[in-house]
Amino acid sequence: NSPLYRGRVAIDNLQMAVARLGTRMVRSLVVSLIMQQIFQPTSEQLDQRFRQAWEESVQVAALSRVLTSNLKHLDREQAMLAGLIHNIGTLPILTMAEHDAKLIDDREELERLIELISAPIGQRILQSWGFPESLIKVPGSYQDLSYDGGELANYVDVVQVARLQTLQGSDHPLAKLDWSRIPSFAKVGIDPEVSVIEIEGVAKDVAEVEVIFLG
């Protein structure tokens, strides 16, 4: 029911729904359901950490979709999917932590483990799901601020900028860096000093995506 994909004709069957949404959007919805089913927390601490990871993914996905609007060689729905799966490697680690009381109680060690191995795990998951290489490299490269994949922006660049934009104005260490030195900003065509969410119409577009995936 999101206005983002609403049309004049009512949808009353699956074929019409797929036609209206597009196969890439349907794939994003399916992936989001799978990701939410991968981890069913039994502890409050891990439930909070999962919700944090999921909300971050949705925020990055929404901004990735917006950032791709002016990049004609990239697909907006594919960019949104790239945002959704950028930290998918976190979920199996949280699942493992469910069976390790020490990790549940030691948030610092859990975060260290996520930082250390979530990227290769994420890439393995996407490979096993048959994702294209353009998306497989996102989990392993979006945190590399010196990443340079070529002259044109790709989905790694888009997700990297989107992720950093979600941190703008926060106390996160990455928010305190000089973003003008990060190649992805120039490729995506975003001024590092600009808060994308404050651009006219962006907040509305982001909110509509969040409604789809967060309810």
Image (cartoon, grey):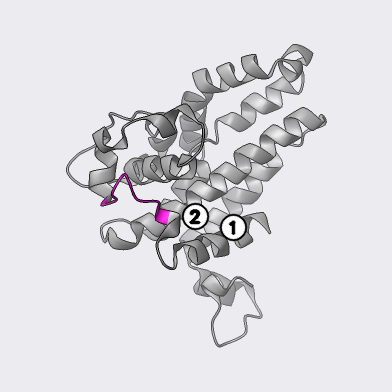
User: Where is mark 2, residue-wise?
Assistant: 62
Amino acid of disc 1: Glu
Q: Secondary structure at mark 1?
A: helix
User: Which residue lies at the image location 55% right of the left edge and 87% below the top edge?
Assistant: 8
Residue at 58 percent across and 56 percent down: it is 29
* Cβ atoms under marks 1 and 2 closer than 8 Å: yes
Front-most of residues 150 and 193: 193
Q: In terms of secondary structure, what is the magenta stretch mainly?
A: loop
Q: Relative to 93, does residue 155 appear above or below in the rendering?
A: below
Q: Is residue 106 visible?
A: yes
Q: Nearer the viewer, residue 83 or 29?
A: 83
Instruction: Say which of 183 and 50 sits in front.
Output: 183
- Is 99 a magenta residue? no
Magenta region, residue range:
189-196
Give neighbour class at mark 1: few <14, some 14-19, many 20+ (Cα, 10 Å).
some
**Which residue: 61% across, 45% down?**
55
Residue picked out by circle 1: 210
Q: Is residue 149 left or right of residue 46?
A: left
Q: Residue at x 77, y 33 (%)?
A: 41
The Cα–Cα distance between marks 1 and 2, rounded to whole angstroms, is 7 Å
State which quarter of the image contains the C terminus. Answer: bottom right
Label 2 amino acid? Ala
